[in-house]
Image (spheres, helix red, strand yellow):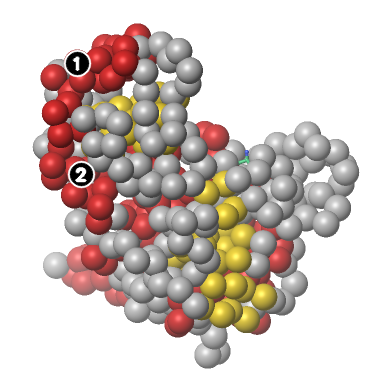
């Protein structure tokens, strides 16, 4: 009994020391969860294009941003250190769970996640549906490595911390701050392989702008997210496999068969135009549905909606139309949806809601 009592005292003292180290002065407390990416990348010189993603630690990144500690008390945690081409559902689950732990702490005002830009939209959308908080959760990355002449990471990180510390950012879902723009997780997409101005929100526009720590919010994401999302990954350790198959002229239907044979529970077709595919692929996709695989029609086209029953008879074939979601975000939603349902009507409703 005495030993239990003593352990409790030790725990309370450690927690008290942790709190006072974090909360200094009247500044808000912001936790940065680092995952890697070009923002943590390093090259041999300031002007060479070849570099290694995820080479710099979060502490070194924060130390390189002058004035950032005037915005907030900052604590960094390294969740992973990978280029986001290696981002996985396992890391996304780890992030969602850690965010949900941190968000319950009353002294945490907001959370920033540093991430590569290649798959930033996928993790942002995953967290938008699985983070159970209205506190600001802000993702940030960069297009140039930390060693580049005119690196964009430091100002992006500064702006992201300013948004995470801003009470006006609350309740807007997961945000992405890049190149002075504040995007919502549902609408943003990467549009350039190398330009600093790569992220756009073509269908819904920006949530706001961020400039040297001053934020202007003028839009609220319309879709359900975070605290109004039905998805809960607290007990989930593995996400269902969902494949994306890219549509083109003379598309090979056997790619759909291969996906089914390799254990996919869902398939997203990045179709041509309004989510279309050739007749042979429609047949293969209909066969997949008969075997219990859920098929979503999205589009390889950069903007626009994919509607039901336009050129393909979704009602007869049991397909789902992706509405506003591009193939990579459709895959995220379908994988989460499959944790709850395999019924096309129910999953279609989710695509209208999230
Ligand atoms: N390949 C890098 C990544 O996604 C690119 C970047 O971060 O901009 O990690």
The location of residue 202, given as percent across then percent down, is 52, 55
Q: In the rendered image, which quarter contains the C terminus?
A: bottom left
Which mark, by number, is residue 348?
2
Circle 2 packing at 10 Å, graded few (<14), some (14-19), many (20+), is some
The location of residue 217, given as percent across then percent down, is 51, 78
| x 20%, y 66%: residue | 4
| x 80%, y 49%: residue | 147
Q: In the rendered image, which quarter contains the N terminus?
A: bottom left
* Residue 27 visible in the snapshot: yes
* Residue 262 visible in the snapshot: no
Instruction: Point out the tag, 1 or 2, that comes first from the N-terminus.
Output: 1
| x 44%, y 29%: residue | 272
Residue 156 falls in image quadrant:
bottom right
The location of residue 11, given as percent across then percent down, is 33, 69
Label 1, on which residue? 287
Q: Is residue 101 above or below residue 162?
A: above
The location of residue 22, given as percent across then percent down, is 50, 76
Q: Is residue 258 above or below residue 168?
A: above
Assign a secondary structure to mark 1: helix
- Distance CA(mark 1)–CA(mark 2): 19 Å
Q: Is the residue at mark 2 in contact range of ligand 1, meaning its CB lies under 8 Å from it?
A: no
Q: Is residue 101 above or below residue 164?
A: above
Circle 1 packing at 10 Å, graded few (<14), some (14-19), many (20+), is some
């Amino acid at each position: 009994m005495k030993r239990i009592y003593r352990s409790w005292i030790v725990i309370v003292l450690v927690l008290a020391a942790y709190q006072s180290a974090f909360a200094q002065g009247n500044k808000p407390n912001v936790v940065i969860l680092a995952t890697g990416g070009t923002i943590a990348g390093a090259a041999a010189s300031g002007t060479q294009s070849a570099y290694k993603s995820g080479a710099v630690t979060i502490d070194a990144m924060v130390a390189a941003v002058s004035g950032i500690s005037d915005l907030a008390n900052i604590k960094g945690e390294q969740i992973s250190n990978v280029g986001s081409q290696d981002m996985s559902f396992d890391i996304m689950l780890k992030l969602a769970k850690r965010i949900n732990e941190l968000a319950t702490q009353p002294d945490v005002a907001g959370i920033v996640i540093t991430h590569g830009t290649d798959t930033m939209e996928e993790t942002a959308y995953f967290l938008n549906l699985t983070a159970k908080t209205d506190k600001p959760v802000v993702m940030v990355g960069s297009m140039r490595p930390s060693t580049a002449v005119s690196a964009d990471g430091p100002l992006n990180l500064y702006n992201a911390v300013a948004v995470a510390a801003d009470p006006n950012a609350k309740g807007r879902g997961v945000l992405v701050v890049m190149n002075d723009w504040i995007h919502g997780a549902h609408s943003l997409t990467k549009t350039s392989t190398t330009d600093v101005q790569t992220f756009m929100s073509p269908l819904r526009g920006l949530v706001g702008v961020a400039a040297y720590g001053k934020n202007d919010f003028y839009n609220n994401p319309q879709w359900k997210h975070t605290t109004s999302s039905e998805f809960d990954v607290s007990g989930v350790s593995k996400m269902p496999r969902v494949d994306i198959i890219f549509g083109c002229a003379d598309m090979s239907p056997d790619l759909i068969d291969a996906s089914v044979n390799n254990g996919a529970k869902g398939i997203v077709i990045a179709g041509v135009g309004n989510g279309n595919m050739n007749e042979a692929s429609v047949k293969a996709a209909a066969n997949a549905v008969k075997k219990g695989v859920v098929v979503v029609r999205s589009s390889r086209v950069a903007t626009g909606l994919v509607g039901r029953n336009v050129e393909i008879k979704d009602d007869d074939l049991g397909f789902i139309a992706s509405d506003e979601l591009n193939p990579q975000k459709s895959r995220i939603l379908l994988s989460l949806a499959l944790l709850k349902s395999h019924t096309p009507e129910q999953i279609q409703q989710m695509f209208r809601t999230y």
